[in-house]
């Protein structure tokens, strides 16, 4: 693990002290000028902070003395796990997250965040754990196409919509970030352990604001949700029932964080989509009928490629598997016309697909970067001209 800066080390100590949350830590840093100065403050100086009286200040001071040993143990544990710490204001800390109310003073990260490069255009996908096959299909579909267009997919690593979103992003060889409601010494839910390892192993990052050994508890998740939306330019809600936590995330994203919110409509007779439909009707979310709507609202570079394109047809909402997007899946389309791409790069890519090739091979042959190739692949995939076979891209025969 890289050596911690003085600021990050001080922030770690503050977060390990009992009775100090993000809001109080921010108040202390603002009053005293830095996290290091806050650690050196006397109880009398701390008592000047609104909401902290003499008794509370004395308790905080005792906690800060104990936090030195707690922080050192946390650093040792992090080294064993391969976890790094990112303090707010330090290089690598996501700048979008730093703008929200009560941002985490410090993040634990397993894997790698790339806010200045590959993760410049993040979008969150949230929804129900107890989702239908339609919800799983749409979450994976949106995530796959968005990730293939250079969008980093952010979600919560939970069962249902979250897991489908992470899988969809990796299916397109894109990046994804899982924000966990526990410390990074835990894997919750346990059935997602392999998924989490794949994400951390070069496909994105696992993130938490909690100390490493904190177990998953219901109280952790509302605070976790603000990080999911805070890391993203916008939030896409897919299949949220009435009272779903995803709706709370959406409202906080729009009202507290100024993020864009979109919602994917579901079946009109499905309780699983009741909350989503209410959100749309109330004007709390823009309607998203396809990934192009997300790219357009978030004003990403890839949005221009969706003009005039048509998305593939999908299975009925009761189906258990996506149909018609990737080669070899579902029944052949009845439309036998072969559209011709208007984009020069897409035309060149199609011309060199004399056999199945990897995205890296295509990038080398075309002389362009990986992001440009991913966007071109996604657009051709949407038009039904190419498909995927494992890690290979191949032309579809009509």
Image: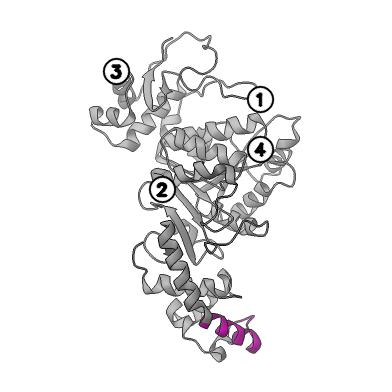
- Mark 2 and mark 1 in contact (Cβ < 8 Å)? no
Residue drawn at 40 percent across, 62 percent down: 79
Q: CA distance from mark 2 to mark 3?
A: 30 Å
Residue 94 appears anywhere in the view? no
SS at badge 4: loop
Total marks shown come to 4
Task: Please name which of the two marks, 3 or 1, marks the residue nearer to the observer.
Answer: 1
Residue 179 at x, y percent in the picture = 53, 52
Element under disc 1:
loop
From the viewer's perspective, is 164 left or right of 394? right
Q: Residue at x 45, y 19 (%)?
A: 327
Q: How much space separates mark 3 and mark 1, taking CA atoms? A: 35 Å
To which residue does mark 3 refer? 351
Residue 349 position (above or below residue 278)? above
- Residue 21, picture quadrant: bottom right
Q: Earlier in the sequence, mark 3 or mark 1?
A: 1
- N-terminal-most mark, 4 or 3: 4
**Crowding at mark 2 (Cα within 10 Å: few <14, some 14-19, many 20+):** many
Say above or below: 73 vs 254. Answer: below
Residue at the (51%, 83%) spot, across then down: 65
Q: Answer with mark 1 or mark 4, whichever residue precedes in sequence.
A: 4
Q: Are marks 4 and 3 in contact (CB under 8 Å)?
A: no
Above-or-below relation of 299 to 311:
below
- Residue 239, by quadrant, is top right
- Indicate which disc residue 317 carries: 1
Q: Pinpoint residue 47: horizontal percent, then vertical percent.
A: 59, 87
């Amino acid at each position: 693990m890289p050596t911690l800066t003085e600021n990050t080390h001080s922030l770690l100590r503050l977060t390990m002290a009992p009775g100090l949350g993000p809001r109080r830590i921010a108040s202390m840093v603002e009053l005293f000028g830095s996290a290091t100065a806050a650690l050196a403050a006397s109880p009398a100086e701390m008592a000047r902070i609104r909401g902290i009286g003499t008794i509370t200040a004395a308790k905080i001071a005792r906690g800060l003395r104990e936090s030195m040993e707690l922080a050192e143990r946390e650093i040792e544990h992090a080294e064993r796990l391969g976890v790094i710490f990112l303090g707010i204001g330090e290089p690598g800390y996501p700048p979008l997250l730093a703008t929200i109310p009560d941002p985490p003073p410090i993040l634990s990260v397993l894997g790698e965040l790339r806010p200045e490069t590959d993760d410049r255009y993040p979008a969150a996908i949230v929804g129900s754990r107890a989702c239908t096959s339609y919800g799983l299909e749409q979450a994976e579909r949106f995530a796959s196409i968005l990730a293939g267009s250079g969008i980093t997919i952010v979600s919560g690593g939970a069962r249902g919509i979250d897991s489908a979103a992470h899988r969809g992003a990796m299916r397109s060889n894109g990046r994804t970030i899982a924000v966990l409601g526990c410390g990074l010494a835990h894997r919750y839910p346990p059935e997602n352990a392999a998924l989490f390892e794949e994400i951390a192993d070069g496909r994105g990052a696992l993130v938490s604001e909690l100390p490493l050994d904190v177990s998953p508890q219901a109280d952790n998740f509302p605070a976790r949700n603000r990080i999911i939306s805070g890391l993203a330019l916008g939030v896409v809600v897919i299949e949220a029932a009435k009272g779903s936590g995803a709706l709370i995330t959406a409202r906080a994203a729009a009202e507290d964080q100024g993020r864009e919110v979109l919602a994917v409509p579901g079946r009109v007779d499905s309780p699983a989509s009741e909350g989503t439909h209410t959100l749309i009707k109330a004007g709390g979310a823009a309607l998203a009928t396809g990934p192009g709507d997300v790219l357009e609202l978030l004003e990403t570079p890839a949005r221009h490629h969706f003009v005039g394109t048509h998305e593939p047809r999908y299975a009925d909402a009761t189906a258990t598997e996506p149909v018609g997007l990737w080669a070899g899946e579902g029944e052949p389309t009845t439309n036998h016309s072969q559209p011709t791409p208007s984009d020069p790069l897409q035309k060149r890519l199609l011309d060199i697909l004399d056999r199945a090739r990897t995205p890296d091979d295509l990038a080398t042959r075309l002389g362009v970067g990986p992001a440009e190739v991913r966007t071109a692949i996604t657009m051709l995939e949407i038009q039904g001209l190419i498909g995927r076979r494992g890690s290979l891209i191949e032309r579809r025969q009509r």
